[in-house]
Image (cartoon, coloured by chain):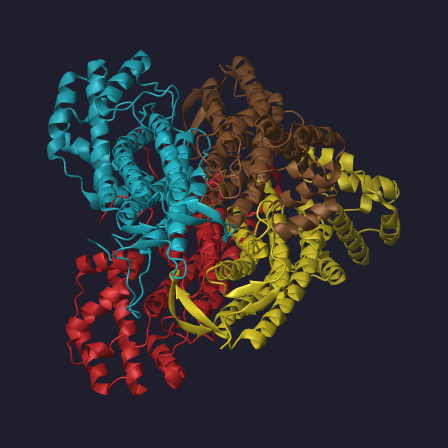
Chain colours: A brown, B cyan, C red, D yellow
Amino acid sequence: MTGHLDLLLADPDLVALLDSAADLATMVEVELALATASAEAGLIPQEAAAAIVAAAPGFRPDLTALAADTLRDGVVVAGLVGQFRDHVGPAHGAALHAGATSQDIIDTALAIRLGRVLALFETRLARLSDGLAVLSTRFGHHRLIGRTRMQAAIPITVADRLAVWQGLLARASDGLGAVRRANLVLSLAGPAGTSERFGDHIGAVRRAMASRLGLSVPDYVPHAARDRIARLGGWLSEVTGALGKIGQDVALMAQNEIAEIALSGAGGSSAMAHKQNPVRAEVLVTLARFNAVQLSGLHQALVHEQERSGAAWTLEWMILPPMLNATGTALRHADAMLASVERIGIAD
Amino acid sequence: MTGHLDLLLADPDLVALLDSAADLATMVEVELALATASAEAGLIPQEAAAAIVAAAPGFRPDLTALAADTLRDGVVVAGLVGQFRDHVGPAHGAALHAGATSQDIIDTALAIRLGRVLALFETRLARLSDGLAVLSTRFGHHRLIGRTRMQAAIPITVADRLAVWQGLLARASDGLGAVRRANLVLSLAGPAGTSERFGDHIGAVRRAMASRLGLSVPDYVPHAARDRIARLGGWLSEVTGALGKIGQDVALMAQNEIAEIALSGAGGSSAMAHKQNPVRAEVLVTLARFNAVQLSGLHQALVHEQERSGAAWTLEWMILPPMLNATGTALRHADAMLASVERIGIAD
Amino acid sequence: MTGHLDLLLADPDLVALLDSAADLATMVEVELALATASAEAGLIPQEAAAAIVAAAPGFRPDLTALAADTLRDGVVVAGLVGQFRDHVGPAHGAALHAGATSQDIIDTALAIRLGRVLALFETRLARLSDGLAVLSTRFGHHRLIGRTRMQAAIPITVADRLAVWQGLLARASDGLGAVRRANLVLSLAGPAGTSERFGDHIGAVRRAMASRLGLSVPDYVPHAARDRIARLGGWLSEVTGALGKIGQDVALMAQNEIAEIALSGAGGSSAMAHKQNPVRAEVLVTLARFNAVQLSGLHQALVHEQERSGAAWTLEWMILPPMLNATGTALRHADAMLASVERIGIAD
Amino acid sequence: MTGHLDLLLADPDLVALLDSAADLATMVEVELALATASAEAGLIPQEAAAAIVAAAPGFRPDLTALAADTLRDGVVVAGLVGQFRDHVGPAHGAALHAGATSQDIIDTALAIRLGRVLALFETRLARLSDGLAVLSTRFGHHRLIGRTRMQAAIPITVADRLAVWQGLLARASDGLGAVRRANLVLSLAGPAGTSERFGDHIGAVRRAMASRLGLSVPDYVPHAARDRIARLGGWLSEVTGALGKIGQDVALMAQNEIAEIALSGAGGSSAMAHKQNPVRAEVLVTLARFNAVQLSGLHQALVHEQERSGAAWTLEWMILPPMLNATGTALRHADAMLASVERIGIAD
């Protein structure tokens, strides 16, 4: 635990997938896959690849040096490769990273970690779907006042409202496949996207690396084409938007005079012992608005000039991890909130 | 022509598809389809439907009254239906709008117009794709300096850079199908989404209406579920983002000392006759950043409380039409910009 | 009336201040002031200035041609000056616009119109303040439940809640002076901000122009320094944010079970005659969220490269007028909403 | 060092001012000031205040428990006060936090830390101003091509361009006073803003607390009025926007063919040893766009319903610290970038 907000606004499971250590470890995985595939293609000696792979488990990057290198270079890769080369030793170190560029390593490492994150989200979405199905079975026949424009309209059932929530999550789940296909891709194209150091072997090296890393090979050079990141961001914000709508509905239903929902374990107040605050419902609204704000930044980063934009790419680094965290956090809160529901609507 | 910015920042073709007159006319189409389908289902008399359909061509809404009604009600439909009923006459007017709610009419009318807008965009994307193919044929073999982080990297060809542009547009085109399927849907669910006035006929009425209007019937109540609008916005911003990247590249290539592109007819200055400003390239960047900003608003509107949120829904009305306009304008500018290219890169 | 949304989402008073015709007319004002001041400084002949001033009342720009020119040049000024020169005639036309650049004319014309817009907003803010004072007098002693985190907390009075609303508007009003000082400034600096055509006369010309136009002379070259626009946007969003908070409070108070406020003339539904929708309250929330979104774009435009950025400047043109419109519309709605209050809170 | 991006995208000085430990320690400061002032006013026993103050140095909050409490309550204060009460002991613990609400503590603790952060920023802005003055003295007379719309316009001097940079920073510095006055304020108003537990003593308690904490007493209840936070965000984004404009200019000047600036120590590439990437210049653009995006979220949070909005307030917590970090980071980068300038423009 590093801070008092770590459970309210962060997702411990994601921290382990997205922090600097995970990032660096995944970059090393990418370098190993590159070395292995390059050796298979005859681009580097087999013994060099073997030495690199053998050295990896004992490689402990010097984080302080890496931070300084990253400040100087704008990316960590030159520093990381330099340290790893030193670790591998002079005989084979030069074979490391051969033909690749920083963005190949960083974007591929991101893709690998996104695979893990999206798998987690898929599981959580399925849990939420189950949770909603249980609530619909338990309370779906209860009465509720349909409300439009913040005014009572006509009677509906709890199932009617839950169906809207379920549909939002079902369509978000359905959208995950396309997001995954677009994002779980290998980047390997060299300094300016032309793969010139790989010659005719580029296809084979890409296929071998992608296979090893559980990614696919895109039919385009992904460096300056960031549409997949924007789509990922859109999907994340769609998930939190769905959960934000649910949270807003719950917060409105939980108002004292309305009392259309009863939640166990709602939050207390430092000053008013009687209060039962629908904290998770509120935070779902917060997280939805947060991601809606951030998404704008990922789309600004589509204006990615020339073969690689330091400015636009770095903007992704600042925005995407918090969006992933917000999404994971919202999924956790939604699950716990649904589990805390003691009643929705009014029984006949 | 209503303003001096109408060609630079607006798309005349879209104005005709999206202005108030087009909006109202499409709402009337929806009411006619509802009346016809309701009559087929036996929910209203056949002669009422016939009278409504017969009266439509002569119906001229009083716009001043509608604006006042819209101010009062937050939506135009009650006022519009009232005027149309008066026009149809007392014998059959009451059959108009039977069972529907404002949102059914407005959202369905939007879906119809989106069908027209997206068809226009599809045509323009195809033209752009052709334009890029022509440029690649003409100049693809020319040399260019690959540039990363705003610095010269290694030599590439014009084809290498154009391939990135082409890929972005190709993937945007590929994404259009899903956007269209999600958005060209009928809304018919009544005041609180329960279709209670249609009883068992709701399925038949929906299918008949949708068929008549060229839409599909969604498997969910679309009133408070706005994910399709957010996805549409994401796609629009993806298109303008791709064009903004192209525009930024062109503006950088057109710098005097770099001169990697030559454009005919570039813009003049009021003070410096010698200047050739890459106006369309710059405006492509503008439009990309504009849509990236707006997208945030459509995602804020996902927090759509209860069965219908006046606040969130109205926010879509303010944001979606300008995004559509920006997208159409960007497509036009990109087409003209590509057509004005006299040279890219350096011939060997 | 040009559209059914013109009263709900637009401000007719602002249209007249901000449309293309007003924009062009103000640009002509600026050119006249420049000609007059330049003649006073001996930079152009007195008779040329006289001829220009005399010709202005009869000048009717050809809007179709201007739109084409604007498309080509990215700005209207070259086209407008060309037409005006033709109208003035060959003897004196060349003296028009001497030494100035497009941005001098457009930004100064904006400043002039902002002066009018901000005066209008000041008046409306004062009216709102009066309206709140009246409500506080009438209902301030009524009881209300203080609500935190959407839950009843402890009893407060209506005056307590109104004081928060009043304070927000009072501070927004207080902030207007600084916004006005920053924005009601002359731009006159020539093609690249160096005023080289004016020589030692630049100070005198600026002072004379500014005096004539009701502006001040900034102590900096304003072309590429857009902080004043960002601050203006922040103020506009602060105003709509305050009104959005009020609107959200009213919408929550107006909920049927809570009924802490009674409004006359609330909006009707096309399907449910009994409903009284707090339309203006909802739209205040909409407008607050709209401006909050837009503000991001004005701050993106702070990255205004070199001596003048076509991309960033044009982004301001797309974003600032809708923000002004949203602010004016929100002020109108808030005034009408307060006037419709029949009761707040519960009398003892 | 906790991550490889900690120097590129974070500001170590700010981490120490803004992390969870600093936040909690400052909250304890606020509770001590409250206890002391309350004892002075006779609201709690002098010995209770003395016991609380005496206990504070030895108080070590259990962070794991606090995170769980924060998850439950949405705020840390109830948990923190509970732990502190246990630490103080039963005789005097109850006097702690008397009359206050969570938001009083959290917002006041934020104000205290903002005072420290803004002092840091002021120092850095002054350094930057000095740095620019030095550059202007050294290189101001050098020639530069003025560039508008990304095209060469007419000759200017380096001093002309630097003056725009200097003006932006000077006005940002000038704006700091108002931001500080608005934000360095005490919050003390109790559960629903009515200070009812303090009775007639509220003025005296506020004045004593504010004096002790180096804050001022606002003339309004600050809980639900968030305009000061929005203004702070606007100022932060104005600073980063100014630095982003400078960074964009530098990145453009540093292009190989243009070479209007020479920087020492520019960043290297993992693949191209010859490259000198203007990393800090690019990151300044990134940080400007980042804050421009975030600002939208602080303005969304102006729609702060009723006496306290969990949803809106929590959104501030997610957005403001990263904005402060981005601003501090940009100020550091700008300083280092200016210090690395070896030449600007062309000597005669």
Residue A71, relative to residue A254: is it above or below?
below
Q: Percent from the top left, x then y, of residue B280?
A: 32, 52
Residue B18 visible at all: yes
Q: Is residue C46 left or right of residue A17?
A: left
Residue D76 visible at all: no
Count of marks placed on residues? 0
Residue C17, relative to residue B143: is it above or below?
below
Look at 38% across and 41% down and name the residue there.
B159
Comparing D49 with B340, the one in front is B340
Residue B90, relative to residue B321: is it above or below?
above
Q: Is residue C195 left or right of residue A232?
A: left
Look at 67% across and 41% down and name the residue there.
A81
Q: Is residue D336 left or right of residue B6?
A: right
Look at 88% across and 41% down and name the residue there.
D89
Q: Percent from the top left, x then y, of residue B211?
A: 24, 20
Comparing D151 with D99, the one in front is D151
Q: Percent from the top left, x then y, of residue D232?
A: 58, 57
Q: Percent from the top left, x then y, of residue B106?
A: 30, 33
